[in-house]
Amino acid sequence: MSTPVFDELPAPLRSVQTRPLFVMRLDVKPIVIVGDTPGPFRRVGIVPSGTFTGVRLSGKVLDGGSDWQAVRSDGSTALDVRLILQTGDGTNITMAYRGIRHGAADVIQRLEKGEEVDPASYYFRINPIFEAPAGKYEFLNRVIAVGTGHRFKHGPVYSVFEVL
């Protein structure tokens, strides 16, 4: 749907272009429940491993990552994740992202029980930021990324895209 305001903008300002960066699969241990806090209902997912595969970088996710989740009063879950990616050539890259997951209560309930649900039946998006050393992967330091996720029984899978 077009509006007069957008129609007047130069083409590069009317849409967002992306290109695939990688697909990442995370293994997550059973969620640690902290519970009700003065803020949100807090829980933490410990990430012992995972993999990522793309044209420009691929490798494994090192043990030690975590996903600090805040379950909000509206039923949505805010994610705050820190990971270390290790490329196939041994380069370590940090990846931090925030995200939001929400959907109909019955869909989220099934999802959290480990049941398969249609990825189109709920919203699951992330915004990664990277820190890489000088060299082959330093381009990541200047990238804004977005991702779409799907939760499987043992952890999420994300399609991560570089915003051009």
Image: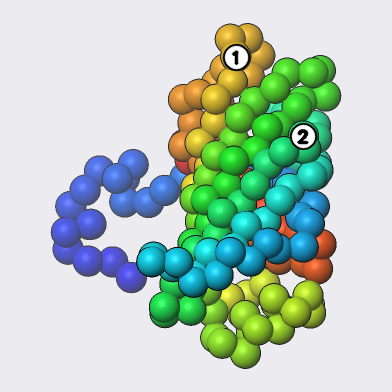
- Model colouring: rainbow
Residue at disc 1, secondary structure:
loop
Q: Residue furthest bottom?
A: 106
Residue, disc 2:
62
Tell me which corner region of the image, top left, top right, bottom left or bottom right, holds residue 108: bottom right
- Residue 117 relative to residue 33: left or right: right
Q: Is residue 131 above or below residue 64?
A: above
Tell me which corner region of the image, top left, top right, bottom left or bottom right, holds residue 162: top right
Whether residue 35 appears in this view of the structure is yes
Residue found 29% across the figure and 45% down from its top: 13
Residue 68 location, x and y as percent?
Answer: 56, 54
Q: How many marks?
A: 2
Residue 38 location, x and y as percent?
Answer: 38, 66
- Residue 24 relative to residue 66: left or right: right
Q: Residues within 10 Å of mark 2 (few under 14, many from 20)?
A: some
Residue 135 location, x and y as percent?
Answer: 63, 9
